[in-house]
Amino acid sequence: MLKLYTCILCPNGCEIRAEVGEDGQPAAIAGHRCPRGEAYVRQEICAPLRNIASSVLVEGGELPLCSVRLTSPIPKARIFDMMRLIHAARVPAPVELGQVLIPNALGLGCDVIATRNVGEG
Amino acid sequence: MTQTDKDVIIIGGGPAGLAAAVKLHELGVRDILILEREHALGGILRQCIHDGFGLTRFSQTLTGPEYAQRFIDAAAEQGIAYMLDTTVLRMSAAHAVTAASRKGLHRFNARAIILAMGCRERTRGALSIPGARPTGIYTAGVAQSYINLQNTMVGKNAVILGSGDIGMIMARRLTLEGARVSAVFELQPYPSGLPRNVEQCLYDYDIPLYLRHTVTNILGDARLQAVEVSEVGEDLRPLPGTQRLYPCDTLILSVGLIPENELALDAGVLLDAHTGGAVVDESYQTTVPGIFAAGNVLHVHDLVDFVSLEAERMAEAVKRYLAGEQAKPAIAVSAGRDVAYALPQHISGARDALLTFRPRRPLRDATLRVLQDGQAILTKRFPRMLPAQMEQALLPAAALKSHNPVEVVIGDA
């Protein structure tokens, strides 16, 4: 079966066509401008992954929030579980860019890290 | 009032201003000052907490705050001077800049001025949407600031008008934060943001995108209760009889960005009717000698990477200007068939020029042609072109045949 994908890895947004066999495995992939696009579509067919960005509440900070992201993408189906974990978290100021706020989040092997500095308020 | 002389005054400490400052310092221009009206450097990137920035400039994907911090750190390392909470009130063609802060009025005389003020959002007023005036209507950037910087949720049940990138990113953000986003409506027959955002911000969360639709009425008393949405025809006008009511407490507008150029007008800088930014040459010099512009104040970019790169190229030109190079705008550049706009609007012909343009409509197997004296002096093929995506092509000085005007046109297959 022919399936169409829009690669989300870079702003080019390549339109990629994939021939998916009856076993659910990709056969032929075309339309990507770089190897990352092909890898993206293979992953997308088998088990889609996404990174998410959000914010964690900061206690005693110059700002109420510290923006965060994951160090690696997680299964799409776990996004809202991850959001619940991020919502429940509280971190004391100061927070430094790159600081691990939640290690091995949901046991998925990725960390939730700060994407900005938040000084003490 | 304080009075200070500077080599370069940079108005705006966002991505364009920071990249220009860091580059100027690298080039040996040290007597520079950034004037920033907010309480922190970084501009709009401070609230763009999603990732996807930096692939072109840094070969890795970063969130907005991380991207900004790279330039803030570089500027700090170089010891670049900046003033926060400082608003420029006036700028003259003779390079006098008047700014206000809590400490009072400041007057600067600069050898060169860099405009890096970015852009602002179009509002409901600009669209003339009829109906009530309840709370619950936000531009996408304002909603983004509430949620990402001020920890204030804007609503529970949202509808989004306009498929600009920030609107789609806010659709995802609201969904992640527990709100329901029932639909995104776009007036045009194609999305106005990037395809990757349609995919990862809307389709990933089953948010429908309705093209050729617009909001035609707003209902509610104190708080928004519903919007009426209509289909539009070929002429983009609402089709009578197609109205549908969407109950919601929040309407997010992502309907365009406008370069923030009131100061530029003050100084007599000529603006381009299509970009809303200054008319510039290949050195990013405006029609007022010694006043330069780059980033969203010049034309609205879809990616910060290109803002930084543009500001860095401009910084090189500012350095040449300070060294005594005179601008000789000789060749007019115009946007022709299927080209929404092309920058720069005129070139000297003395050096290679990076042309930046957008197509008027989505095109496949498109060919960009730069015409002079009836001949194509540059041809570049593009498998796909979208109005959402800025494109560039280098026009070598050697390709120019004369000093006659050039026209940028696009043809499809």
Image: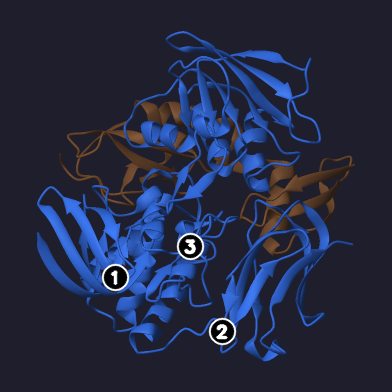
Q: Which amino acid does label 3 sit on?
A: Val
Circle 1 residue: B95
Circle 3 residue: B307
Q: Residue at x 41, y 34 (%)?
A: B142
Circle 2 residue: B348
Is residue B69 toward the left or the right of residue B283 in the image? left
Quadrant containing the N terminus of chain B in the rendered view:
bottom left
Q: Mark 3 lies on which chain?
A: B
Quadrant containing the C terminus of chain B in the rendered view:
bottom right
The percent position of residue B266, horizontal first and vertical second, equals 36, 58
- Colour assignment, chain A: brown
Q: Which chain carries label 1?
A: B
Q: What residue type is labelled 2?
A: Ser
- Colour assignment, chain B: blue
Is residue B67 toward the left or the right of residue A58 in the image? right
Q: What element carries label 3?
A: helix
